Amino acid sequence: MKKIPICLGLFAMVFSTSCNTHKQEKHEERTFVVTNPVYKDTSITKEYVSQIHAIRHIELRAMEKGYLQNISIDEGQTVKKGQALFQIMPNIYQAELQKAKAESDAASIEYQNTKLLADNDVVSQNELALSKANYDKAKAEVSQASTHLSFTSIKAPFMGIVDHLHVREGSMLDEGELLTTLSDNSKMWVYFNVPEAEYLDYMMNTKKNEKEEVSLLLANNKVFNQKGIVETIEGEFNNETGNIAFRATFPNPDSILRHGETGSVLMTIPLKHALLVPQKSTFEILDKRYVFVIDNNNIVRQKEITVGAELPHLFVVENGLNENDKILLDGIRLVKDSQKIKYELERPDEVLSHLDMYAE
């Protein structure tokens, strides 16, 4: 009877050992999928924070003092070129014009009489010249008074959208007082800053006289329905940020864009002969990225790589790999460094075809 527990214990140990051996053999028999990095011509889309400006955005200010008699428009209204916007009470300026015209008429009569006398040698030529100067001065004062009167009617210098009204009817205006702003939104200037290295790449890769086409990602995370063209680059770098400002022009036929909006410019940058690896074949440790490389003895080796750019499902590798390396594609959490594995090699093109990636 005392031998029964001993037999049961031995049986349990044999059974446990057998199970562990079976699990280990099962683990060692797993076949992992391995592939190679591949060189491809492709492109990446870089995103730059931008500021959106109307192609023309001006302040409308009072050119003369006086009471604001009438406002003909409302905030946010689209106005035509030459349309009346504000009317300053013109009475004083009308009176000044009438006075100037009367003085001009008197000077004209005096000049004609003096000229008649001068023709008959009754008065000197100097007196005639003085009369002519007085007449010219009177005509100039008429022109000046007429200009002052015209300034009481403030009209739109171009077709655009009226912004916030800073005054109300009946306000007493000072010369130069801000009334509103006017924006021509038919085209929009979109400014974005580009780092020095990317500026150099742009200049070296863009053909002379060729305009780069860009897209605009709006604040609602949707791409604007018009393409823009990079037209100008500012002349100097910002010493504090190391960036230089680009300006792209976007047509705005539906008036979706408004002055002062923000967004992100999307610029497509070609990559020639880029070494690509699937993102899922990499892992990160303390801000460094690694892959598992399989050597000629089927041993897994952890290897650090330098990622130069990111694409959907892919990384562009700058350093650490070449196209002959065999990298572990699946099961990177199931292996460890220096472990021997069994694997099957899958062609890179077949791997890429399942990754929703566009490459040329």
Image: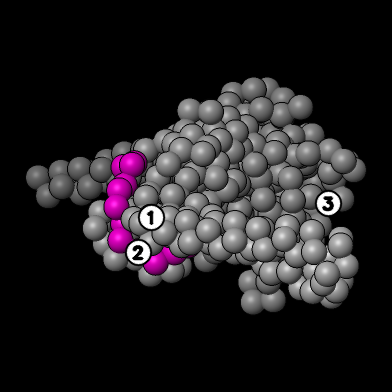
Q: Which of the two discs, 1 and 3, sits closer to the camera?
A: 1
Disc 3 element: helix
Q: Which residues are magenta?
A: 61-74
Is mark 2 in CB contact (under 8 Å) with mark 3? no
User: Residue 293 placed where, x, y %?
Assistant: 69, 47
User: Residue 69 placed where, x, y %?
Assistant: 29, 52
Quadrant of the rendered image containing residue 338: bottom right
| Of pointers 2 and 1, the one earlier in the residue sequence | 2
Position of the N terminus, as image quadrant, is top left
Magenta-drawn stretch contains 69? yes
Q: CA distance from mark 2 to mark 3?
A: 54 Å
Quadrant of the rendered image containing residue 65: bottom left
Q: Mark 2: few, some, or many residues within 10 Å (few <14, many ≥20)?
A: many
User: Residue 53 placed where, x, y %?
Assistant: 54, 50
Q: Amino acid at mark 1?
A: Pro
Label for residue 90? 1
Label for residue 66? 2
Q: Residue shown at 82%/72% (left/top)?
A: 123
Position of the C terminus, as image quadrant, is top right
Disc 1 element: loop
Q: Amino acid at mark 2?
A: Gly
Viewer-closest of 143 and 286: 143
Residue topped by disc 3:
203
* 286 in relation to 299, above or below: below
